[in-house]
Every structure is written in structure tokens, then in C-alpha cells.
């Protein structure tokens, strides 16, 4: 007979039922992710399980649960497998990632060397500024631009030139850009996420796009093996992270596709939303311009990476844009039973947080629909929100994004040029809402944001 004081096992989280049997919750989530999760939260509380067809996911909501999610040990919540499984149609089968996972420590060491060392970031800044100036000049030469579409093209070129070399963009830029568009557009479609091995049109388009990238990677690996450059792919070939062995082409292609997805989707959305939000508020745009002009007066027009950290108002604008646009869900896999609230998530089940719900919670951020970068004016307070799990951009803990410094280099260097040297006028000062149905990261708008860009008059 059990003792009356013996601790009883925790029950599993409640399962969500909505609409049609089996498929109803997944359909509701796809149609309106935020509305669906809020309904579930009102009915079940902060912990509940949803059948998303490809897998069952237990959502753990709120800042406290987000903090536990990000700081959980890797042997408790697995980041790598869960993320790859959720994006298989985009990046390819798990077999392409086997050695990347088995050698995670040495692989991460190479990534840190390539994306987190100041001397390498300063090399990348040359490509970032060159491409940004070319693109901004082209924007100013046409009557109007689709801000998010043009930003996407710019970020794509920056990523390729910085990470694969300017020669790769010159020779294969259009092919890579088209292949990446096919992967991003088709790889996040519900049928591709739920059934990545079923030969649906979206999955077939993704497979063809990956094949095109593999062909380019074969050629590039041959070239860089003979004559290494100062790009990211040359670093991988010279470091040989697999017990002294170089990665095979499909492995390197898979890693780069995952890297490009993270570096493109979130960076594009953050850049464009920040510009759009400030363009809709001329007073804020002028504050950003003044900061960039003063920064150039102190450091010159091409400062090294450490100096870019001094752009405090731009940092606040970035955080506020991210707060309103970042991530319906992030995912892990429970390697052991995982306690959340009053429940225990079974081993093997997926565990998800929904950062946007916390970001838009009036109990955490007063008047959350209002765009107000001054809520992040105190950097120490902003960082405390990160540590508490109340603000999510680059993650927290063991799996904090290794590309954070590269992303900041791209954003801040390009913003410095744009806010200092250009003006922008929106055709519609009322910005469209976010489209949460077509994203695995930062949401894009539901319709194009048309704008006119002009060079600033010299005074």
C-alpha cells in the first residue's frame, strides 16, 4: 500500500479537440495559429497537447515556461532532431544531418569560428555594405518597391556573397535565389510539413530545388578545395569537423540550407518590419537617421563590428519590431518525461513554445499593439526580459542562435546606410497585419508594402 505522502505521477497534458475528428486541431492551427492557441489557452491553461498530424506537440505557454524550455539541458529537450524533422521538406532527410548531429560539439565550434569571430565578421561587412549600397541605389532608381520582396532579394544576395563568396553569386546567384525561393515557399506548406516524404507537388518542387543546390555545391567544394577563399564554406573545408574528415557535399548543402533559412527569413522580416514601422512614424525615422549620422561622424561610414553595438535606438527599434512579428512556435523533442505546470509530457513528444503570445500579452507589455521602441530604451532591462523568457529573438541557454552576431552585422550595417543616406515614403501609412499562416519564423505581411525610396538631400 502506497504511503499517503508518496508523490503521485503527474498526468499527461490535456488534448485539444476542435472541429473534425483527428484533423480538426491541425486545420484550425493552420487557418489561424494565434487565435487557435489563445482559444486553447483559455480552455486548458498554459499547457496542452495538439495533434499537428506529423507529430503531437505539447505547447507550454508563458514567460516562465519559455525560460525553462530554452534553458533545459540538451539531454532533456533535443533541439536538433525536432527542428530538422519539422523542416524536412525544406532541408532534406535526416540522413543528411546524421554526422552533423553526431559531431555537434565540433560542428558548433566551426560555426562559432565562422559566424562569431570579430575578424571574420569584419570581412563579411565588406560584402554586406557593398550589396546593401547596390540594392538601395537600385531602389531609389525606380518609382516604387515592394519593401519585403526587395529586402528578401537583398538578404539572399548578402548571405550568398558573405558565406559562399561574391564569385558564387556572380555565377550562380539567380539559380540559388530561385531554388531557395522554391524551398522556402513550398517547404512550409502544410502538406510538406505534415507529409515530407509523400510526393506532393510541394515536396517534389523542394526536392528539385535541393538537387539544383547540390550541383552548385559540388562545383563549389571542388573549387574551394583547390583554392580556399575567405568565405564560410572554405572554413568548413579547412576545419574538417568530422574527426579530421571534410563534410560530404549533401551534408554541407543541408547545413547551408538550414543556415540560409534562419539567416534569410528572420533577417528579412526584421529588416523590413523595422524600416516599415519607422517609415510609418516619421518622428522615429528621424531619430534613427540622427543616430546613424552621429555614429558615422564618430566611427566613419564603414566601422568595424564592435562599433555597431553602439546603435542603441536602432537596437530598441529592432527589438520592438521583433516583439510584434516573431515566431508562432519553436520546437524541441522530449528525450525524457518533461514536467510542465501540473503535467508530464511523455518521452518522445514534441514540446513547443509560442513567443508571439508572450510578446503580445498585455500582462507583460502594456498596450502591446502599439509600436513603441522606447519600451526597450534601457538595455539592461531589455536583456532582463530575455533572461526571464519574456522576450525571444535569438533564443536562450545552450541553443542560443549561433548566427546572432552575423545577423546583427547584416541588420545594423545595412540600416546605417539606409537611415543615413535614404528616405522612404509608404504608399499606405497603415501597415498590413502579419500573416501567421505561412511562416516558421518571423511573419511577413498579408499584402505587399509598397514604398518610394529616394536619396537624402545633402545639407
Image (cartoon, helix red, strand yellow):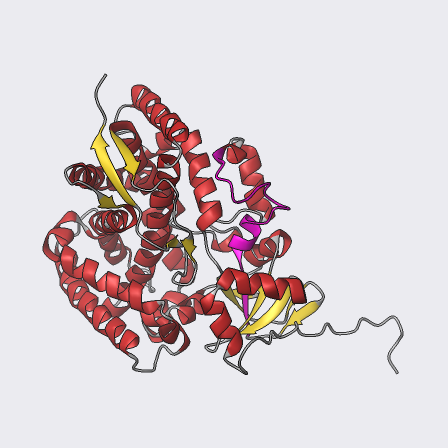
User: Is the residue 394 above or below the residue 291 in the image?
Assistant: below
User: Is the residue 121 above or below the residue 114 in the image?
Assistant: above
User: Is residue 244 visible to us here?
Assistant: no
Occupied quadrant, residue 293: top left
**Residue 124: x %, y % from top left:** 25, 42
Q: Is residue 351 magenta?
A: yes
> Which region of the structure is painted magenta?
349-373
**Residue 220: x %, y % from top left:** 15, 60
At horizontal 57% and vertical 58% (from top left) the residue drawn is 69
In the image: residue 222, left or right of residue 404 = left
User: Is the residue 278 above or below the residue 21 in the image?
Assistant: above
**Residue 440: x %, y % from top left:** 41, 61
Quadrant assignment for the N terminus? bottom right
User: Is residue 365 visible to us here?
Assistant: yes
In the image: residue 369, left or right of residue 9 = left
**Residue 39: x %, y % from top left:** 60, 64
At horizontal 34% and vertical 27% (from top left) the residue drawn is 289
User: Is the residue 13 above or below the residue 125 in the image?
Assistant: below
Amino acid at each position: 500500500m502506497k504511503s499517503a505522502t508518496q508523490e503521485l505521477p503527474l498526468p499527461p497534458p490535456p488534448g485539444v479537440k476542435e472541429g473534425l475528428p483527428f484533423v480538426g486541431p491541425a486545420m484550425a492551427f493552420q487557418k489561424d495559429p494565434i487565435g487557435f492557441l489563445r482559444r486553447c489557452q483559455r480552455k486548458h491553461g498554459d499547457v496542452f497537447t495538439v495533434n499537428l498530424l506529423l507529430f503531437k506537440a505539447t505547447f507550454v505557454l508563458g514567460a516562465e515556461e519559455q525560460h525553462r524550455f530554452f534553458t533545459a539541458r540538451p539531454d532533456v529537450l533535443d533541439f536538433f532532431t525536432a527542428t530538422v524533422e519539422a523542416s524536412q521538406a525544406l532541408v532534406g532527410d535526416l540522413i543528411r544531418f546524421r554526422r552533423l548531429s553526431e559531431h555537434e560539439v565540433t560542428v558548433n565550434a566551426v560555426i562559432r569560428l565562422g559566424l562569431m569571430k570579430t575578424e571574420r565578421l569584419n570581412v563579411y561587412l565588406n560584402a554586406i555594405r557593398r550589396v546593401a549600397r547596390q540594392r538601395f541605389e537600385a531602389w531609389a532608381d525606380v518609382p516604387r518597391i515592394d519593401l519585403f520582396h526587395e529586402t528578401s532579394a537583398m538578404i539572399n544576395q548578402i548571405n550568398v556573397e558573405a558565406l559562399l563568396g561574391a564569385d558564387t553569386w556572380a555565377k550562380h546567384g539567380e539559380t540559388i535565389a530561385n531554388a531557395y525561393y522554391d524551398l522556402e515557399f513550398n517547404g512550409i506548406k502544410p502538406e510538406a510539413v505534415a507529409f515530407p516524404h509523400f510526393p506532393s507537388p510541394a515536396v517534389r518542387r523542394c526536392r528539385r530545388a535541393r538537387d539544383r543546390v547540390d550541383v552548385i555545391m559540388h562545383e563549389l567544394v571542388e573549387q574551394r578545395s583547390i583554392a580556399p577563399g575567405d568565405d564560410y564554406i572554405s572554413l568548413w573545408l579547412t576545419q574538417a569537423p568530422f574527426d579530421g574528415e571534410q563534410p560530404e557535399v549533401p551534408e554541407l548543402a543541408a547545413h547551408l540550407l538550414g543556415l540560409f533559412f534562419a539567416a534569410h527569413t528572420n533577417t528579412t522580416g526584421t529588416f523590413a518590419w523595422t524600416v516599415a514601422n519607422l517609415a510609418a512614424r516619421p518622428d522615429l525615422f528621424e531619430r534613427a537617421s540622427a543616430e546613424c549620422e552621429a555614429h558615422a561622424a564618430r566611427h566613419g561610414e564603414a566601422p568595424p563590428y564592435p562599433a555597431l553595438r553602439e546603435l542603441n535606438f536602432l537596437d530598441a527599434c529592432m527589438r520592438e519590431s521583433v516583439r510584434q512579428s516573431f515566431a508562432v512556435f519553436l520546437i524541441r523533442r522530449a528525450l525524457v518525461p518533461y514536467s510542465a505546470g501540473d503535467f508530464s509530457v511523455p518521452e518522445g513528444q514534441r514540446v513547443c513554445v509560442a513567443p508571439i503570445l508572450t510578446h503580445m500579452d498585455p500582462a507583460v507589455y502594456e498596450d502591446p499593439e502599439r509600436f513603441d521602441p522606447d519600451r526597450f530604451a534601457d538595455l539592461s532591462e531589455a536583456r532582463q526580459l530575455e533572461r526571464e523568457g519574456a522576450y525571444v529573438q535569438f533564443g536562450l541557454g545552450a541553443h542560443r542562435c549561433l548566427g546572432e552576431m552575423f545577423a546583427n552585422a547584416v541588420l545594423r550595417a545595412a540600416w546605417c546606410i539606409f537611415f543615413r543616406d535614404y528616405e522612404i515614403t509608404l504608399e499606405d501609412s497603415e501597415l498590413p497585419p502579419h500573416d501567421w499562416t505561412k511562416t516558421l519564423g518571423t511573419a511577413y505581411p498579408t499584402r505587399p508594402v509598397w514604398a518610394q525610396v529616394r536619396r537624402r538631400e545633402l545639407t
